[in-house]
Amino acid sequence: MKKIPVGIIGATGMVGQRFITLLNYHPWFEVTCVAASPRSANKKYKEAVKDKWVIEGKIPDSIAKMTVSAVERDIEQVAKQARLIFSALDMDRGQIREIEKEYASLGMAVVSNNSAHRWTEDVPMIMPEINPEHLELISSQDHGFIVVKPNCSIQSYVPMLTPLLKFGIKKVVVTTLQAVSGAGKTLKGWPDMQDNVIPFIGGEEEKSELEPLKIWGQAVNGRIKMAKINISATCIRVPVEDGHMASVSVYFNKKVSKKEILKIWKNFNPLKKLNLPSAPDPFITIMEEENRPQTRLDRGLGNGMGISVGRLREDGNNGFKFIGLSHNTIRGAAGGAILTAELLVKKGYLQMSSRTK
Ligand code: NAP
């Protein structure tokens, strides 16, 4: 079976680099072009990235020697080379909205990491295990095919809360402890973060409170009717390279037992039967030790696609507290987008054989 040709726009950044390593040897997708800003355009990828390469291991040979295209100037050229576009751009949101639309209008399916289209009415915001049914919005899109993934912070608590929705959730209070790579930076390149914690991440608390409501919403007539759950979020930057942790309190409308919650989490793996190449099994790993999950030890579970949870304990009447953890540049960014694209293939939105170039 021929692989689907893929382009990465924003390929030289932190998330773009993750795409490149995760797509190396992917069984369904093959990177055929990479694009970035005019600063990187026309250079070999290796030259454009130089010492900005932050991923363990070297740049795959096939990509290192690829010439970088310019995201805006070379759209038509990219369209000849790719059927699917992963967007990892970081620039003005209005500009990204237009660029992604332009790629989609030329017939490419766009799966984006950026927040620009998250609130575009007919664009589904997908966490593959949680709301695959929202993909039906694609058929009512008149601007071309665009799907987005949500913010990285919510991956550390939405997976655990989702199967508990059936108990009736009254309120969620969450504090996220977020890695520096979430800001596209490293500890070495961000001296202010060394030996320090910064109690503010611009725009992050709003995203952490609102995005789950779209994800848990209902698709009605090509739009999402938002869920109504009260989430209160505090987002804090901490001095770790990768991995977002969340300290969560959840309050139910009725009494729920610890045993019930653990059983539900253990069995929650909605993608298992689809056998998608990047889907972790288990989806949620329950940690019994009182000092787990830990960021450095556990962010790599399931090749960075697994979610871990621990310290489940009661919190007053009808409440529970727990700690969640996910890898922000893998599950929360490139890996989550690749899993979304795999779901698109499996559900027939991207035909693998007939539309390859
Ligand atoms: P980054 O390291 O700053 O990389 C940004 C990319 O955008 C680079 O390839 C850069 O190209 C390109 N770019 C910047 N200005 C451009 C322009 N004017 N025209 C064309 N390309 C331009 O950012 P990142 O951390 O990888 O994040 C990428 C996106 O993913 C962001 O929207 C971010 O919010 C989102 N995201 C990040 C994370 C995370 O954990 N880091 C998680 C989820 C989502 P040059 O190298 O040529 O400048």
Image (cartoon, helix red, strand yellow):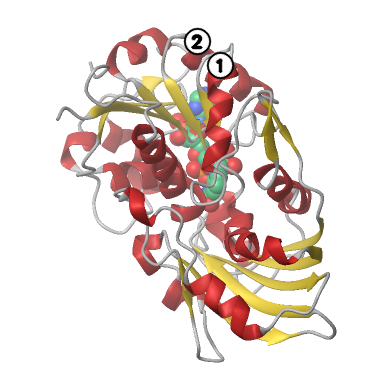
Location of residue 352 by image quarter: top left
Image vertical order of residue 325 relative to residue 28, above or below: below
Determine the CA span between mark 1 and mark 2. 6 Å
**Image marks 1 and 2: residues in contact by CB distance under 8 Å:** yes
Residue at x 34%, y 62% (from the top left corner): 303
Does any portion of residue 184 appear in the rendered image?
Answer: no
Give the image location of residue 169, x and y in percent: 78, 64
Image quadrant occupied by the N terminus: top left
- Would you name the residue on which mark 1 appears? 101
- How packed mark 1 is, by other alpha carbons closer than 10 Å (few <14, some 14-19, many 20 or more), is some
Residue at x 53%, y 19% (from the top left corner): 139
Q: Is 303 displayed left or right of 10 in the figure?
A: left
The single residue placed furthest to the bottom in the displayed view is 290
Give the image location of residue 272, x and y in percent: 37, 56
**What's the residue type where badge 1 is placed?**
Lys
**Disc 1 CB within 8 Å of nearest ligand 1 atom:** no
Element under disc 2: helix
Residue at x 44%, y 63% (from the top left corner): 283
Element under disc 1: helix
**Disc 2 CB within 8 Å of nearest ligand 1 atom:** no
Image vertical order of residue 7 relative to residue 266, above or below: above
Image quadrant occupied by the C terminus: top left
- Would you name the residue on which mark 2 appears? 105
Q: Is 319 displayed left or right of 28 in the figure?
A: right
Give the image location of residue 201, x and y in percent: 73, 55
Q: Is 88 displayed left or right of 324 in the figure?
A: left
**What's the residue type where badge 2 is placed?**
Ser
Does any portion of residue 162 appear in the rendered image?
Answer: yes
Q: Which of 28 and 77 is in front in this view?
A: 28
Location of residue 174 by image quarter: bottom right
